[in-house]
Amino acid sequence: MSSIDRVQIKGNRKGLNLLINLLEFKSTEELIDAVKQKLEPLKNFYSGNAMYVTTYPIRLKDEERDLLKKVLMETINLSSISFEEANRKEDLPVTFNGVEEGSTKFVMKSMRGGQLVDFKGNVVVVGDVHIGAEIFAEGNIIVLGQLKGRAFAGTSGNENAVVAAMKLTPSLLSIAGTYARPPESEPSFPEVAKLKNGSIYVEPYIPIKFEY
Amino acid sequence: MAESIVITSGKGGVGKTTTTANIGTALAQLGHKVVVIDGDTGLRNLDVLMGLENRIVYTLIDYFEGRCKLKQALIKDKRLPNLCLLPTAQTRDKNDITTDQMVELIKCLKEEFDYILIDCPAGIEQGFENSIAGADSAIIVVNPEVTSVRDADRVIGKLDSKGIENHRVIINRLNHEMTENGDMLNVDDILEILSVKLLGVVPDDRNITISTNKGEPIVTTEGTLAGTAFINIARRITGEDIPLLDLKPEEEGFFSKLSKLFRKK
């Protein structure tokens, strides 16, 4: 990943927000270098503004904060610098939470081997998903046909995502990073795969009894 | 109205070139003006199968690079005057041709011929892109093997994304006995996996090897099962409604059964 993605600048109501993903850095020096590199070309543009810094997934140690504050002040002539608590929900890359109601992609024909759908939302395929095809969805995956390819639902971490198909025989199935292998036998009825207590459960799909 | 058809498969060695040569010859026998184009630059074989290897002077690439006229590159078949072969170069590679050139070429050929058959190389790289560029429809050759069916599925997806929605499949090298015993994918299995229209089934036939080595397409030899299958396919392409060939080996006669019975004792 490039330095642009691990250090981001966003503007909002409260002023400039510097977002830092600490998982991408091995040392404090590397972090300081990346921040400098990111801000150096923009120093005239941002000078005189207030900035607050958010780090995730954890907060910085006090001495690291002081060092970063010093570097920021030296690089850009900011009016003030503050630090936010980590893990503030709206600042983090969000988990897709539209599994009940959210943006959905419809694929109106069968997906053949080698074809790929990657969507930040739910995916509905009106047709079969042949072996060798792959679906990545941040939400649910619904196949109105036989699912033989690979299906990855809830890719951004939504554990409520489901995978449903008229014939659920994927070569690999994943919900929010938990994986399941294909079934031994072919089902003769539609099924739904859900994540419960860290394991994937496959249940027959019976419309009336189906509880979401 | 001229029609250009690409014969492809994804996997190699399933019989694309044999199919091209035979359908081309059969269509010409039916009285149509046919040209078969070898798309496998660098590994050309179509000329060998048609027995026209020794007649090649100019190739597709010579035409593209302006060293000859299109008429000079076309080779007339030695048996059928309304059949032509457009060979490709053996000493060049697939990147020496562009898709635009192929589209332009097929446009020119359409004025002259009824059917333009393009023999596609194996794979899904430049050679494939070039071969499908000017095609109106596609014939996918598939063997009753899982590997071949997988590759065919991939290729059909590619054709769909390129806008070639009219594709039909030929199941080649079907062994009737093995499918009966369940040792080989049968016609229905393949059609279910691929969900495409069937154009024909060609049985596994030793005569194919003989005809390949002789440079005479099997449709020119009368009475072979594979030859009849190819002729039927050609007639289906022209729009005739021909039922599928019965691939069951001929029933044994009464006397041969009887003599077998005695032999056992």
Image (spheres, helix red, strand yellow):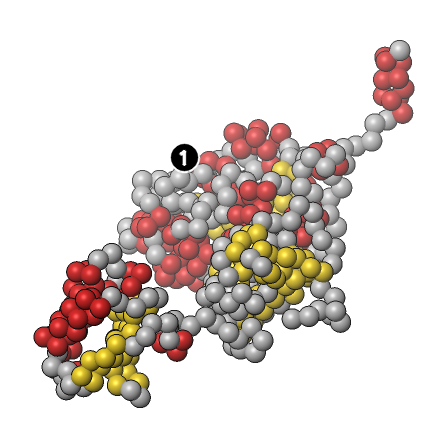
Q: Please identify the quarter of the rendering in which residue B264 is found.
A: top right
- Left or right of A6? Residue A136 is right
In the displayed structure, would residue A82 be above or below residue B123?
Answer: below
> A43 and A28: which one is in front?
A28
Residue at far bottom of view: A13
Q: Please identify the quarter of the rendering in which residue A44 is found.
A: bottom left
Residue at far left of view: A74
> B222 and B180: which one is in front?
B180
Amino acid carrying label 1: it is Asn
Q: Residue at x 30, y 68 (%)?
A: A59
> A185 and A31: which one is in front?
A31
In what element is the residue under mark 1? helix
Q: Residue at x 58, y 55 (%)?
A: A199
Q: Residue B40 location in percent, x, y? A: 42, 45
In the displayed structure, would residue B61 be above or below residue B157?
Answer: above
Q: Which residue is mark 1?
A: B54
Q: Residue B111 location in percent, x, y? A: 47, 62
- Left or right of B189? Residue A76 is left
Q: Residue A114 location in percent, x, y? A: 49, 55
Quadrant position of the C terminus of chain B in the picture? top right
